[in-house]
Image: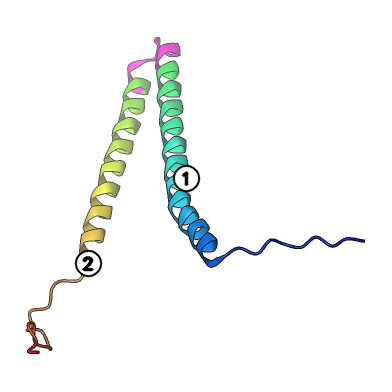
Amino acid sequence: MSSDTDVRLTSGQRLARGLKYSVVGPVDLTVGGLGVGLKSAASSASWLGSKLRSDEALEEPRRRRLLLWIVIGAVVLAGGAATFSIVRRSTRPDPSPLPPSVEVAPKP
């Protein structure tokens, strides 16, 4: 009977592996998120294009309703972006109006 033993990593190897995964992980998440978002946008645009092409004989009220929903969606997205920007800016702390509590240039 033989037992499998794990090869122990040195501190340098462990550090290198940790740094590698610390950098690669967020990059993979970002690329994956962008890929999903772009595929979703392309799919939505394709669906909308085929819907508009197949419904050439839409009566005017239905066409206006579809355009209204498109405009509402764009307004909601723009409002969400503006809200996100405002909330993000408001969470940043303002610089303190008080002078520093320690000397800026300490004497040796």
Give the residue type at disc 2.
Answer: Arg
Q: Nearer the viewer, mark 1 or mark 2?
A: 1
Q: State the residue in front, 65 or 84.
A: 84
Q: State the residue in front, 93 or 108.
A: 108
Give residue 61's position: percent from left, percent from top: 34, 22
Q: Compared with residue 13, is residue 69 higher up or lower down, i.e. above or below?
A: above
Residue drawn at the location 60% of the way across and 63% of the way down:
9
Q: Compared with residue 9, is residue 62 higher up or lower down, i.e. above or below?
A: above
Q: State the residue in front, 84 or 33.
A: 33
Q: How is the model colour-coded?
A: rainbow
Residue drawn at the location 47% of the way across and 45% of the way down:
28
Q: Secondary structure at mark 1?
A: helix
How crowded pointer 2 is (Cα within 10 Å; few <14, some 14-19, many 20+) is rated as few
Furthest residue in direction top, as rendered = 57
| Rendering quarter of residue 93 | bottom left
Give the residue type at disc 1.
Answer: Asp
Task: Please check the rendered image and state whether residue 58 is part of the magenta-colored stretch, yes or no.
Answer: yes
| Numbered label tally | 2
How crowded pointer 1 is (Cα within 10 Å; few <14, some 14-19, many 20+) is rated as few
**Circle 1/circle 2 CB separation < 8 Å:** no
Q: In the picture provided, is 15 more to the left or to the right than 67?
A: right
Residue drawn at the location 9% of the way across and 89% of the way down:
108
Give residue 101's position: percent from left, percent from top: 12, 88
- Magenta-colored span: 52-61
**Distance of mark 1 from mark 2, alpha carbons?**
28 Å
For label 1, the residue is 28
Q: State the residue in front, 14 or 94.
A: 14
Q: In the picture provided, is 65 more to the left or to the right than 102?
A: right
Q: Which quadrant of the rendered structure holds the N terminus?
A: bottom right
**Lower position in the chain sequence, tag 1 or tag 2:** 1
Give residue 87's position: percent from left, percent from top: 25, 60
For label 2, the residue is 92
